[in-house]
């Protein structure tokens, strides 16, 4: 049977104000292209059951992680958080970690994983480091040769950026495996856990495969999702 992949989304509201959960379609599309069965997490009380049911967890992009989760006060009024999502993802990460099941994070996903393992974040790249990494700007990243990404793509990769925050202090047992530049400062762009099947990227590979991509002529990122599916089949 194809692996069942649980995906996290963000809270929203229907036109009549009814609370809702939502997720960009391209996350689910690429799980499907890679051979998985996408399932959206929609209830904060079901983390243990979700982790029993699913073979892997994909933490998608979205709003900012609450600074309290990495021991800081809110610095900027434009940092927008999603408390229900924070709560759900925290529970899901714990449940999947307890079962040693694979987790893959994208954008916000790498940030919430870093916070979960005790790391911290820069709350705003332009103010704290300088440079622009938001709004789809494209730039190269350097990849660690002996890493998942290095084995898939070589020494470097042109990627997209839709984030204004970045990893600062790495969480316990997380290793940096990709880096880029922000105004002369090195930014960690991807991490792997030293012993668990957990890894994450700061960019959006789901927008680097399929019919519409950014960068327009990027290297196809479907191998990222295929590798994750292979982890989830084991």
Image: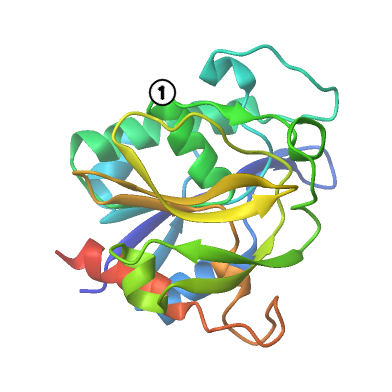
Is residue 195 positioned above or below 25 on the image?
Answer: above
Report the residue at 28% width, 35% height from top: 173
Q: Nearer the viewer, residue 21 or 148?
A: 148
Measured as percent of width and height from the top left, residue 26 is found at: 60, 70
Measured as percent of width and height from the top left, residue 114 is found at: 45, 34
Report the residue at 58% width, 50% height from top: 107
Measured as percent of width and height from the top left, residue 200 is found at: 43, 52
In the picture, residue 85 is in which quadrant?
Answer: top right
Report the residue at 70% width, 75% height from top: 214
Report the residue at 77% width, 53% height from top: 134
In the picture, residue 19 is in which quadrant?
Answer: top right
Q: Nearer the viewer, residue 191 or 46?
A: 191
Left/right placement of residue 212 relative to residue 178 reads right
Q: Which of the colour schemes (rainbow, by chain, secondary structure, one colour) is used?
A: rainbow
Left/right placement of residue 17 relative to residue 10 reads right
Is residue 217 positioned above or below 68 on the image?
Answer: below
Say whether residue 104 is visible: no
Q: What is the crowding at mark 1: few (fewer than 14 residues within 10 Å), some, or many (at least 20)?
A: some
Disc 1: which residue: 118
Farthest residue to the left: give it: 234
Numbered marks: total: 1
Left/right placement of residue 127 relative to residue 117 reads right
Q: Secondary structure at mark 1?
A: loop
Measured as percent of width and height from the top left, residue 224 is found at: 41, 71
Question: Which quarter of the rendering shows the N terminus?
Answer: bottom left
Question: Which quarter of the rendering shows the C terminus?
Answer: bottom left
Farthest residue to the front: give it: 184
In the picture, residue 158 is in which quadrant?
Answer: bottom right
Say whether residue 102 is visible: yes
Left/right placement of residue 17 relative to residue 73 reads right
């Amino acid at each position: 049977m194809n692996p069942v992949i649980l995906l996290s989304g963000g809270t929203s509201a229907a036109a009549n104000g009814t609370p809702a959960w939502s997720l960009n379609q391209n996350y689910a599309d690429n799980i499907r292209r890679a051979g998985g069965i996408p399932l959206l997490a929609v209830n904060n009380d079901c983390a243990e059951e979700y982790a029993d049911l699913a073979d892997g967890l994909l933490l998608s992009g979205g709003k900012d992680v609450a600074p309290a989760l990495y021991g800081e006060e809110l610095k900027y009024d434009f940092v927008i958080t999603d408390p229900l999502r924070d709560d759900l993802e925290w529970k899901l990460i714990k449940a999947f970690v307890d079962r040693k099941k694979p987790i893959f994070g994208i954008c916000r996903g790498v940030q919430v994983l870093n916070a979960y393992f005790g790391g911290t974040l820069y709350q705003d790249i332009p103010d704290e480091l300088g440079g622009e990494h938001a709004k789809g700007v494209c730039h190269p990243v350097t990849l660690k040769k002996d890493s998942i990404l290095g084995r898939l793509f070589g020494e470097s990769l042109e990627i997209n950026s839709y984030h204004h925050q970045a990893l600062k202090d790495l969480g316990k047992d997380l290793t940096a495996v990709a880096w880029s530049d922000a105004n002369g400062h090195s930014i960690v762009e991807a991490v792997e856990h030293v012993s668990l099947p957990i890894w994450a990227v700061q960019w959006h590979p789901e927008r680097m495969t399929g019919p519409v991509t950014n960068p327009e002529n990027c290297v196809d990122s479907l191998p990222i999702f295929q590798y994750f599916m292979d982890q989830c089949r084991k």
